[in-house]
Image (cartoon, rainbow, N blue to C red):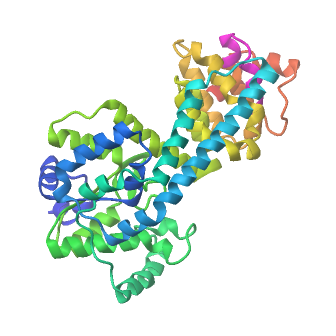
């Protein structure tokens, strides 16, 4: 009885998901629709081909349709600006690597990829060749707008909900003006109204995951929709079912539901586009993620793509033009198969260090091909307000792997 009474606090079983997927209505958030324009043509058309199989079960809230039509061109122009900025910043890094360290960065494929993105977006702005196909599949059933009284009530209730951190949308309060900050709440209220009137279960697909007001996370991983949403949905719709997915997990489940196979490259691109958007939206606040990706990545182009979107601010805020992270991981490529990989990965902990400017000095260590030099990078974590490397005397002490200080750093 407890699990049934408070089911939103528990992960649903297989029977719940089987019934949900067989009977539900699918709703795709604004960001998911706009991302269709950011994939390459092959991926976009394959995704739309798969979604065509459920097109009679897709419904679009008015707010999502309005946001999509309003924000699409601006989003594409922003992507062009981002790609141009990445190319400019990586060119600066490449020049600095060569002039300061004599290292030639091989990034031709990455440069070609970014320039192709720019051309792709410019063509779509000039002539939208996707909209007709999207309307045929996702835009068949769009709701009417809520009336002014309904919207006024949502805005008024939103003030109270946001103060109490009741999802969704409270994460938008600090970033968007009124009434735009209530956009997610309007979508949610439209979904509740539709589900209650039509007696429909709902699967909602969104990439709005950074603010934690649609999803819950554990140890950094998304584990499911916010339980507050599940509770409210159950209460307001007489126990209809609700679940939310990000795009990649959704297509994993869709693959299983249709007993079909979605190309791995397409799913990888879905993840990459979202990660790129996440980095752009969070800028320098997520610089540690960039550094971790630099340290852990074996793919130069992918690594550049991950870090590139934050370079503009990173170069100014953290002076990473001197850090030259690309030297670090490029020179360390050959070491990734080494048994000491755990030591190298531990470098990621340095990204959390408040003295991030001290990491600048890592670029000097990376010039040495010796694994021992690379493994000693944790010494930098102990630097406080001195941006230079330890002098020879202190270095000799640190070089002793049995010293207490060194042991603490490795832990």
In the figure, residue 150 lies in which quadrant? bottom left
Residue 359 in view: no
Q: Position of residue 193 (x, y in %)?
A: 25, 76
Residue 32 in view: yes
Image position of 235 with respect to 311: above or below? below
User: From the image, which quarter does the C terminus lie in?
Assistant: top right
Residue occupying the point 74% across, 20% down:
365
**Magenta stretch holds residue 315:** no
User: From the image, which quarter does the N terminus lie in?
Assistant: bottom left
Q: Assign the magenta stretch its main secondary structure.
A: helix
Q: Position of residue 350 (x, y in %)?
A: 65, 34
Residue stretch rendered in magenta on the structure: 359-374
**Magenta stretch holds residue 367:** yes
| Residue 91 as seen in the image, left or right of residue 337 | right
The residue lying toward the viewer, choosing from 222 and 29, is: 29
Residue occupying the point 17% across, 76% down:
197
Q: Residue furthest top?
A: 370
Image position of 307 with respect to 203: above or below? above
Q: Which residue lies furthest to the front in this view?
A: 127
The image shows a total of numbered marks equal to 0
């Amino acid at each position: 009885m407890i699990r049934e009474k408070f089911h939103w606090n528990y992960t649903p079983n297989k029977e719940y998901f089987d019934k949900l997927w067989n009977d539900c209505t699918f709703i795709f958030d604004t960001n998911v629709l706009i991302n269709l324009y950011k994939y390459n043509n092959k991926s976009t058309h394959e995704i739309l081909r798969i979604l065509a199989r459920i097109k009679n079960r897709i419904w679009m809230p008015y707010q999502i349709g309005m946001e999509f039509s309003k924000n699409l061109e601006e989003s594409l122009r922003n992507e062009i600006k981002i790609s141009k900025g990445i190319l400019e910043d990586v060119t600066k890094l490449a020049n600095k690597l060569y002039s300061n360290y004599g290292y030639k960065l091989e990034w031709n494929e990455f440069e070609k990829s970014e320039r192709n993105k720019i051309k792709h977006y410019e063509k779509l702005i000039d002539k939208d060749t996707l909209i007709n196909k999207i309307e045929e599949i996702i835009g068949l059933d769009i709701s009417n707008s809520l009336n002014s009284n309904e919207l006024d009530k949502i805005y008024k209730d939103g003030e109270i909900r946001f103060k109490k951190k009741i999802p969704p949308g409270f994460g938008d309060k600090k970033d968007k003006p009124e009434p735009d900050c209530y956009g997610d709440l309007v979508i949610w209220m439209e979904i509740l109204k539709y589900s209650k009137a039509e007696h429909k279960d709902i699967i909602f697909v969104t990439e709005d995951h950074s603010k934690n007001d649609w999803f819950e996370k554990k140890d950094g991983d998304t584990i499911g929709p916010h339980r507050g949403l599940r509770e409210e949905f159950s209460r307001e719709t007489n126990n209809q079912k609700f679940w939310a997915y990000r795009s990649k997990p959704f297509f994993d489940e869709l693959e299983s539901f249709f007993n079909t196979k979605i190309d791995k490259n397409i799913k990888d691109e879905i993840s990459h586009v979202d990660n790129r958007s996440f980095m752009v939206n969070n800028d320098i606040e997520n610089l540690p993620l960039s550094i971790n990706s630099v340290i852990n990545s074996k793919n130069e182009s992918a690594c550049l793509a991950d870090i590139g979107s934050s370079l503009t601010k990173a170069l100014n805020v953290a002076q990473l033009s001197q850090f030259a992270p690309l030297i670090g991981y490029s020179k360390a490529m050959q070491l990734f198969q080494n048994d000491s990989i755990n030591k190298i990965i531990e470098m990621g902990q340095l990204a959390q260090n408040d003295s991030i400017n001290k990491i600048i000095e890592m670029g000097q260590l990376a010039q040495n091909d010796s694994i021992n030099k690379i493994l000693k990078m944790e010494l930098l974590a102990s630097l406080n307000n001195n941006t230079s490397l330890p002098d020879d005397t202190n270095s000799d002490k640190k070089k002793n792997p049995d010293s207490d200080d060194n042991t603490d750093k490795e832990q």
